[in-house]
Amino acid sequence: MKHSIKIFSLTIGLLFLLQSCVSKKKILYLQDIDSYNDSEVLQTETTLQTNDILKIDVGAFIPEAALPYNKAAQSGAVMANNIDIMKLDGYLVSKNKTINFPVLGEVSVAEKTIPALEADLKSRLITGGYLINPSVTVRLLNAKVTILGEVNNPGTYTFTENNITLLQALGLASDLTINGNREDVILIRETNGKRSTTHLNLTESSWLNSPYQNIQPNDVIVVNQNEAKVKSAGFVGNLSSLISLFSIILSSIILITN
């Protein structure tokens, strides 16, 4: 009887350990990163989308000549230093992918990247005889990424850089929790009115050479729970409760038999 009880106790203990164990191969990031040394870093330019808010600055050899093309100059220096006010005062891309620019009127931004829009506005100002050799800079003011699921701080994060990487975005959310599924991170992206969904394995490095190395504005990252966490929350997870119950029964049997 005592021998059977020992076997039963050992079996229960092993079941408990097996349920709670997660292989480090499912936790460690970029496990084959050494094979990607000296690989080329891909730089991608995103096209402007509906509801983007742009800050556009125009400069000229004679600064006064560029004043009509600069909203910030018309609004005052104090407003120009507040990003929220800058958004209200910026150029909102319409559903038709256009902006209403001073003097030039309605300008299409469809299929244009930020450098392409800068070149287009500069060309229009020169060929229209408005300015001589002007400078044009465009910045996106409302770039954001949403990160949901098994991360330490889920939420929507704004960024002012032209590009941030996927790893930087996850860093904004304070990294994945230990329960995050690193082998199947979902990235949802909308481009030109079409939605695409991609599954990324962060334990590998192949995605570093893909278009998903860099985050695009309005990307959504979803980190689902790993297998161990799912088991602990569902029917299989009831094994923990069963183990506890069996342990109580076993303890009672040991007390009675002794």
Image: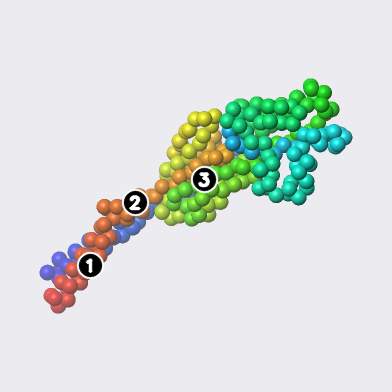
Q: Quadrant of the C terminus?
A: bottom left
Q: Which residue is mark 1?
A: 247
Which of the two marks, 2 or 3, is nearer to us in this view? Answer: 3
The quarter holding residue 133 reads: top right
Q: Amino acid at mark 1?
A: Ser
Q: Which residue is mark 2?
A: 230
Residue found 48% across the figure and 33% down from its top? 195
In this picture, is 233 found above or below 111? below
Q: Is residue 253 left or right of residue 230?
A: left
Tally of marks: 3
Residue 18: image location, x then y, percent: 30, 56
Q: Is residue 224 left or right of residue 164?
A: left
Look at the numbered disc 2 and give the secondary structure of its residue: helix
Q: Which residue is mark 3?
A: 146
Q: Earlier in the sequence, mark 2 or mark 3?
A: 3
In this picture, is 230 found above or below 256? above
Which of the two marks, 2 or 1, is nearer to us in this view? Answer: 2
Residue found 85% across the figure and 33% down from its top? 65
Look at the numbered disc 1 and give the secondary structure of its residue: helix
Q: Amino acid at mark 3?
A: Thr
